[in-house]
Image (tube, rainbow, N blue to C red):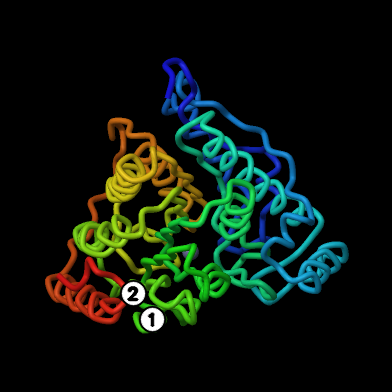
């Protein structure tokens, strides 16, 4: 990358705040401006290597890259009349506009990464991974992660994209969309789905047909923390990534695995978030010329969200982790949990062995 070129594009629009799912709902619209203000406070946006992108809304044709036409029509109709998709996923003209802008942000930074204008892309507010081809749910209407992957695959003739989902919930929508697609290696690391939404994302769900072996689930027991998470990255994500040889890495997940989050029961710290994206950006540097798009969007404790999103972005940008602090000290990760994680890792290696040479050694 030539010197003096902005190295990280961050997409943001003040209308993202319209993605507010109503009074009492954990998905609040002020999450976005709070994180953005914090980024400003940390001096992130004034850094010479950062370029801020104000996105255009994604078009209907972008949604149709992934979603069925009937489903897209349904969401537009529900939005027009401000009727909910399901009990926890409301629709309105404002929410729809924000969803299209957030998706547009992902497409904008993804294009810049692939064009070589920047090395890293950050699509603020992204990661609506519970939406499948013809369904939504879990606060999600359109799967911006999958739309981004398919858009870039088509536009740049890519045939090896790796998606790492580090949200506390399994990425069931993304998983379904690429379940039989060997051009997308999808790895979801999440809290054991027997204990949390969406109730799916088990080790044996490995993909089907030509995509068999390319869908990887890492269910972590409640209480799992930074140490176990890094173990998963080193012992599962790294070998698969090396053998797969991605042309681009996309990762999604916000602060809901944090130990103080209100929906999840994992024990990741803000420093842990920094380490996760620092690890993934390192993989991108090694394997695909640094090409990495981060989509931080989840998180339901407003007091830890801005710091955690900042930590994710700082890790992706390889900044020093200065100023990343916890509001209180994290609970330790119990030994029995660490043991359980080791068991999960060896189960995954066993199940995926037939498809991956690196796991047979
Ligand atoms: Zn989540």
Q: Residue at x 29, y 79 (%)?
A: 354
Q: Secondary structure at mark 1?
A: loop
Viewer-proximal residue among 166 and 168: 166
Q: Horizontally, is 12 left or right of 182 in the view?
A: right
Q: Horizontally, is 306 left or right of 79 in the view?
A: left
Q: Is residue 326 above or below residue 66?
A: above
Residue that mark 2 sits on: 219
Can you see residue 231? yes
Q: Which mark is residue 239?
A: none
Q: Horizontal and vertical percent for residue 87?
A: 67, 76
Q: CA distance from mark 1 to mark 2?
A: 6 Å
Q: Do the CB atoms of the residues marked 1 and 2 lie less than 8 Å apart?
A: yes
Residue that mark 1 sits on: 202
Q: Residue at x 62, y 62 (%)?
A: 143
Q: Residue at x 19, y 58 (%)?
A: 227
Can you see residue 274? no
Residue furthest to the left: 335
Q: Horizontal and vertical percent for residue 164?
A: 41, 59
Mark 2 close to ligand 1, CB under 8 Å: no
Q: Horizontally, is 185 left or right of 94 in the view?
A: left
Q: Residue at x 24, y 55 (%)?
A: 330
Mark 1 close to ligand 1, CB under 8 Å: no
Q: Horizontal and vertical percent for residue 172?
A: 51, 73
Q: Horizontal and vertical percent for residue 73?
A: 83, 68
Residue 220 location, quadrant: bottom left
Q: Secondary structure at mark 2?
A: strand
Residue 259 location, quadrant: bottom left
Dot 2 alpha-carbon crowd within 10 angstroms: few under 14, some 14 to 19, many 20 or more: many
Q: Is residue 299 above or below residue 286?
A: below
């Amino acid at each position: 990358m030539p010197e003096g070129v902005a190295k990280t594009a961050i997409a943001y629009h003040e209308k993202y705040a319209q993605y507010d799912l109503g009074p009492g709902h954990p998905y609040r619209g002020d999450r976005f401006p709070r994180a953005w203000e914090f980024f400003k406070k940390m001096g992130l946006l004034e850094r010479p290597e950062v370029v801020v992108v104000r996105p255009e809304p994604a078009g209907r044709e972008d949604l149709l890259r992934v979603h069925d036409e009937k489903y897209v029509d349904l969401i537009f109709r529900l939005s027009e009349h401000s009727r909910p998709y399901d009990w926890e996923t409301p629709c309105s003209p404002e929410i729809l506009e924000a969803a299209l802008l957030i998706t547009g942000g992902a497409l904008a930074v993804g294009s810049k990464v692939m064009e070589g204008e920047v090395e890293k892309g950050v699509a603020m507010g992204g990661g609506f991974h519970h939406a499948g081809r013809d369904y939504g749910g879990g606060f999600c209407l359109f799967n911006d992660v999958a739309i981004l992957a398919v858009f870039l695959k088509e536009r740049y003739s890519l045939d090896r994209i790796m998606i790492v989902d580090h949200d506390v919930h399994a990425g069931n929508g993304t998983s379904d969309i690429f379940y039989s697609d060997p051009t997308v290696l999808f790895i979801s690391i999440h809290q054991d789905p027997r204990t949390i939404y969406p109730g799916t994302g088990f080790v044996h769900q490995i993909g089907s047909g030509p995509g068999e072996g390319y869908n990887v689930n890492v269910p972590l027991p409640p209480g799992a923390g930074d140490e176990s998470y890094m173990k998963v990255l080193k012992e599962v994500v790294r070998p698969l990534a090396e053998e797969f040889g991605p042309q681009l890495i996309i990762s999604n997940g916000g602060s809901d695995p944090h130990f103080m989050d209100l929906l999840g029961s994992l024990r990741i710290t803000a420093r842990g978030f920094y380490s996760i994206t620092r690890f993934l950006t390192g993989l991108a540097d090694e394997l695909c010329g640094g090409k990495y798009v981060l989509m931080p969007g989840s998180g339901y404790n407003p007091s830890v969200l801005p710091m955690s999103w900042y930590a994710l972005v700082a890790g992706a940008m390889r900044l020093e982790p200065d100023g990343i602090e916890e509001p209180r000290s994290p609970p330790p990760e119990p030994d029995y949990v660490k043991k359980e994680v080791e068991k999960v890792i060896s189960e995954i290696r066993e199940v995926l062995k037939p498809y991956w040479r690196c796991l047979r050694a």
